[in-house]
């Protein structure tokens, strides 16, 4: 059996691939451990300035591997709160806190926690053949892995509730039309577009990206005045970063900005 998570470094960005294609990359402990290892490296590597997460084979991720929840093996009253707190939630918190853009390239079906893992990326792009399924109701669970948070914020009450209660697949093009993800592209264009975006971020201003991520996350809870105060504080940091001076100089000199140096 190969590695459950593949991790490659490219010029300025990393690609992390869930790799259990025969199980549609369903989550098992080895995937959680592989993702945690990948993030250990990504968080500490200044050469990695953006991340792509994708899946091997025809699926992106089918959520929790249900073979691990077989009631004849693990008992019929498992503590799922514990598995979320030990395995899923730490990873989702790390993704949100990472001061680098995360692009999720959804190559096929994304179901259960797999769908919501995809939605936790900063930018989610999906292949036209992909779909998003809040599969939980079919096995008598609620959407987890951040699903209730993203559905309620991005879709509005009716669409969020209907997807959660019916477990109907949402095709990628409709997910983009509804604003659940950024865009849907032809299957053959998925990785080229994700990599072009990652390369763009790798050449962009890292501090501005980190501060933008922080500002937009805070906007989910702040009122207008608090957000204006935060923008003032973060823009001050952006101005001090040195990249602003380079960006303005490049504009005035009609050349491409060079954000390659770090502070
Ligand atoms: O437990 C906790 O810690 C709490 C956290 C819970 C989080 C969750 O994610 S709960 C939700 C779990 N996921 C699901 O309920 C989805 C189950 N899968 C499906 O409904 C379907 O497989 C799909 C709609 C995703 C795709 O359907 P299809 O027809 O394209 O593929 P398939 O034939 O169903 O799947 C291909 C193989 O993958 C198949 O195995 P086989 O027959 O070739 O040996 C199938 O059993 C396997 N597979 C797919 N999903 C899972 C899975 N095996 C284990 N666990 C899965 N989740």
Image (cartoon, rainbow, N blue to C red):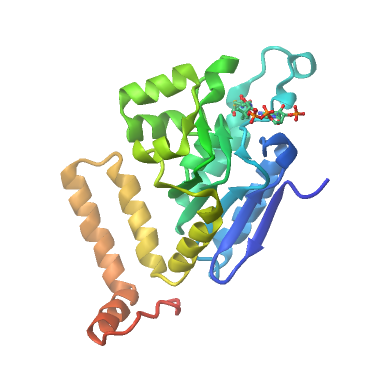
Rendered location of residue 64, percent (x, y): 64, 30
In which quarter of the view is residue 173 placed? top left
Rendered location of residue 232, percent (x, y): 21, 59
Q: Nearer the viewer, residue 149 or 60?
A: 60
Q: Residue furthest right?
A: 1
Residue 151 located left or right of residue 105: left
What residue lies at 57% left-to-right and 72% top-to-bottom? 11
Q: Nearer the viewer, residue 232 or 174?
A: 174
Q: Nearer the viewer, residue 187 or 234?
A: 187
Quadrant where the C terminus sits is bottom left
Residue 149 located left or right of residue 54: left
What residue lies at 56% left-to-right and 41% top-to-bottom? 90
Q: Residue furthest bottom?
A: 253
- Count of labels in the image: 0
Q: Quadrant of ligand 1?
A: top right
Q: Is residue 239 above or below residue 234?
A: below
What residue lies at 46% left-to-right and 38% top-to-bottom? 172
Q: Residue furthest left?
A: 225
What residue lies at 66% left-to-right and 62% top-to-bottom? 8
Rendered location of residue 245, percent (x, y): 28, 79
Quadrant where the N terminus sits is top right
Q: Is residue 197 above or below residue 256?
A: above
Q: Is residue 42 above or below residue 31?
A: below
Q: Nearer the viewer, residue 227 or 189?
A: 189
In which quarter of the view is residue 256 placed? bottom left
Residue 196 located left or right of residue 156: right
Rendered location of residue 154, percent (x, y): 34, 35
């Amino acid at each position: 059996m190969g590695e459950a998570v593949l991790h490659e470094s490219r010029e300025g960005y990393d690609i992390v691939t869930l790799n259990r294609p025969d199980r549609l990359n369903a989550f098992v402990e080895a995937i959680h451990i592989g993702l945690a290892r990948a993030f250990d490296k990504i968080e500490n590597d200044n050469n990695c300035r953006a991340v792509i997460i994708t899946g091997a084979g025809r699926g992106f991720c089918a959520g929790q591997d249900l073979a691990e929840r077989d009631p004849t093996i693990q008992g019929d009253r498992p503590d799922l709160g514990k598995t979320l707190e030990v395995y899923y939630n730490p990873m989702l918190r790390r993704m949100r806190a990472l001061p680098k853009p995360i692009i999720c390239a959804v190559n096929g079906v994304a179901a259960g926690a797999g769908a919501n893992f995809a939605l936790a990326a900063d930018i989610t792009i999906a292949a036209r053949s992909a779909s998003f399924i809040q599969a939980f109701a079919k096995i008598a669970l609620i959407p987890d892995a951040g699903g209730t948070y993203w559905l309620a914020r991005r879709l509005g009450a009716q669409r969020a509730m209907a997807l959660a209660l019916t477990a109907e697949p949402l095709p990628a093009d409709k997910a983009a039309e509804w604003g659940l993800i950024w865009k849907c592209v032809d299957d053959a264009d998925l990785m080229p577009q994700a990599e072009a975006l990652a390369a763009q971020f790798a050449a962009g201003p890292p501090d501005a990206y980190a501060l933008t991520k922080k500002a937009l996350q805070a906007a989910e809870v702040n009122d207008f005045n608090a957000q204006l105060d935060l923008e003032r504080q973060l823009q001050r940091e952006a101005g001090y970063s040195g990249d602003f001076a380079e960006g303005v100089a490049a504009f005035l000199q009609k050349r491409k900005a060079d954000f390659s140096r770090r502070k």
